[in-house]
Image (cartoon, rainbow, N blue to C red):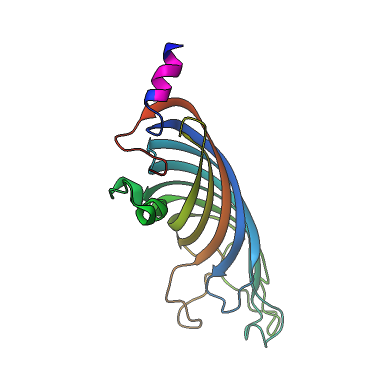
Amino acid sequence: MGSVAVRAQNAGYNFNAYGIGIGGGIVHPLADLKKGYNDKAFNGNFTYYFNPYVPVVLELQAGKLRGGGNDISIDKDTRRYSNSYKAVMLHVDYQLGDAIDYYRSGFLNIIKNFYGGIGVGAILNKVNTNRYSLLDPTYRFPGSDKSTNVIVPLRFGYEFKIYDYYGVPKFGIDIGYQHYVTFGEGLDGYEDPTSLFKNNAPDQYRMISIGLKYNFGPEHSYDKAIGRN
């Protein structure tokens, strides 16, 4: 009975320590080949909440990235790739609610769940390519079909929080945009010399995603009411 009374007294201030979630979205490569295609990617994640507006997330992601083509109208050198990749990342998001005083403000209560984030991880590339030129079968494009690169995710989005009876955020629906910068040439499998091919930026890809998260574990108290107030 006492614990119920304490929860009622702290209603709206508590949050769970952990969360687990799944998500998916559309990915698009920004690599050495000019032509890129939209494909799907999926993720699973585990969250530790430093506070309700600062989640630290371990994410596993898998998807496909494709670009180029066999026809010179698509790629003048007949380069083509399909990357069935996997990635593991650790990232931190920062929601506006940690910085602003949203008490009794309808507008600020809405925008408090916008966030930005950054992280680091590794991407494992498994690429199927045209390793030899279709125009000159004696020329082998430099590169590797399997590689591992460091990856930095840049994250922007909004989380819709769903509260239980006591005002604890139990579910989250996340809509976001992620931009991933890799350090290496493994995303498309081509490591062509800059003297022959334009290559003035690291391999990258972007993702528009939606995710669902369930929060659980011990409850901690925050210094502001978390729900709408």
Whether residue 84 is visible to the viewer of this picture, yes or no, is no
- Indicate yes or no whether the magenta region holds residue 5: yes
- Indicate yes or no whether the magenta region holds residue 222: no
Q: Which residues are magenta?
A: 3-8
> Which quadrant, please, contains the C terminus?
top left
Residue 57 lies, with reference to residue 178, above or below; the image says above
Q: Which secondary structure dominates the residues rendered in magenta?
A: helix
Residue 194 lies in what quarter of the image? bottom left
Q: Is residue 81 left or right of residue 58?
A: right
Q: In this orientation, which residue lies closer to the viewer: 81 or 29?
A: 29
Indicate the position of residue 129 as horizontal and vertical percent values.
67, 68
Q: For the point 59% across and 63% down, which residue is it?
A: 27
Indicate the position of residue 6 as horizontal and vertical percent values.
39, 19
Residue 111 lies in what quarter of the image? bottom left
Residue 229 lies, with reference to residue 38, above or below; the image says above
Residue 116 lies, with reference to residue 73, above or below; the image says above
Q: For the point 61% across and 53% down, which residue is it?
A: 24
Q: For the point 42% across and 24% down, which residue is it?
A: 8
